[in-house]
Image (spheres, helix red, strand yellow):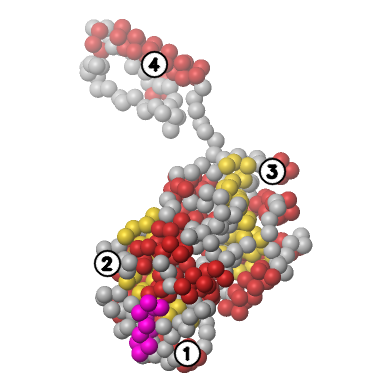
Amino acid sequence: MFADYGLHERLLKALSTLSFKEPTPVQVAAIPPALEGRDLRVTAKTGSGKTAAFVLPLLHRLLQDSKPQAGARVLILLPTRELALQTLKEVERFAQFTFIKAGLVTGGEGYKEQAAALRKNPEVVIGTPGRVLNHLETGSLKLGDIEVLVLDEADRMLDMGLSEDVLKIAKACPQERQTLLFSATAGERGLGQVASAVLRDPQLLLLNRRDDLNENLKQQIITADDVQHKERLLQWLLAHEAFEQAMVFTNTRIQADRLAGVLRASAVKAYVLHGEKTQDERKLAVERLRQGSINVLIATDVAARGLDIGGVDLVINFDMPRSGDEYVHRIGRAGRVGQNGLAISLICHTDWNLMSSIERYLKQSFERRQVKELQGSYQGPKKLKASGKAAGSKKKKQGKKSAAAGKGGAGSGKPSARKSDKDRPAVAIGDGFTAPKRKKPGTAEG
């Protein structure tokens, strides 16, 4: 129960109003040490409830120690404006019975309006690194009173090339601050470097490992002959799978646009989202999906970063992602907080090696599935194995060669007849044998 953590009564009232009863595993693990003021590095999958895991302790801290004359006391950094806006809404929900105010600082919005809002001195500032750094450099945002720095979705921020901005902002905050770093994956070497630079004696909380992510999510692959075959499979899946909302991922915006046309032609209510779409178009896509006017969103990884849509229960990888972590981000959009979901990857010959490397990275084996109505000829790479008969025949020939060498070889005292090059048996490159070396006259074998 949340009451067991000693949270402020106004926060408990908000939790009761919002029907929050039992904390999730990440909240159970992170709230107590966060309340103690410890630095944390938390790895927890998307949709596990980690926003409340850091929002509740920082709000409790602000309520316990009121400082009306201070500047911003909490800074929360996120990779995209959509995630920042969603976090602002969560802060406002949990702080609804308090006087704590929060401000939003992101790109794509009016700079002057944000500067005016910052002059009202909100206690909590939520933003994206680039715009926060802009306000910091122009003096409209001061970080000298920051007590808690939160880096949420830190692995995504590094993927987007924001590590330098994050480090500059962290350096501008007081050294004695509390820092909470959350990520969906353990990340690569770069995340470790950032963590060591911003955290002091952190407590490490690994709520999931690569090999047990998304336990409520079934992961399948379907082989395809080519792109056109993939398109037919995609149409079949969207027509026959039971789902509320689906996300289809491609690696390029050209492919995303093509799929949008293909699906609309088959009366699928789909919307495409990629890097060339404006911020208004991004907002429109999310809003239409939530309202139900569309139920399929086709997106590239860059465009989909930060889109937190709760009702997605089907993810289809039309193109395999280029890394295991990106795969985790994609499929993490389905099967959230105890809900079941399905992730399907369409695999042709150009995708197989990438898919296999992701299986090894996650230490998983994806379920192989066939669509009988659209079954193609490609079923994965063929395994070339010598038959038992052929292998026995090779051994027999090798035995005869050895016997012949013993009888008529150079060491037997009998002259051995040398075969000309044209009489030598042909040796196929790559069949497991090496051509015999020419022997100098008079040398013995052995």
Instruction: Name the magenta segment's main secondary structure.
Output: loop
Task: Work out how far the residue at label 1 is from the one at label 2, CA to CA, in angstroms.
Answer: 32 Å
Give the position of the C terminus as an image quadrant. Answer: top left
Residue ID for mark 4: 398
Callout 2, which amino acid?
Answer: Arg
Crowding at dot 1, Cα within 10 Å, few <14 / some 14-19 / many 20+, comes out as some
* Near-viewer residue (232 or 209): 209
Q: Residues within 10 Å of mark 3 (few under 14, many from 20)?
A: few
Residue located at (62% from left, 57% from top) = 313
Placement of 175 over or under 445, stated as above or below:
below
- Mark closer to the observer (1, 3): 1
Percent of width and height locating residue 393 = 47, 16
Numbered range of the magenta stretch: 62-74
Name the N-terminal-most of marks 4 and 3: 3
Residue, disc 2: 200
- Classify mark 4: residues with Cα within 10 Å, few (<14), some (14-19) or many (20+): few
Q: Earlier in the sequence, mark 2 or mark 4?
A: 2
Distance of label 2 from label 3 (alpha carbons)? 53 Å
Q: CA distance from mark 4 to mark 1?
A: 86 Å
Q: Are marks 4 and 3 in contact (CB under 8 Å)?
A: no
Camera-side mark, 4 or 3: 3
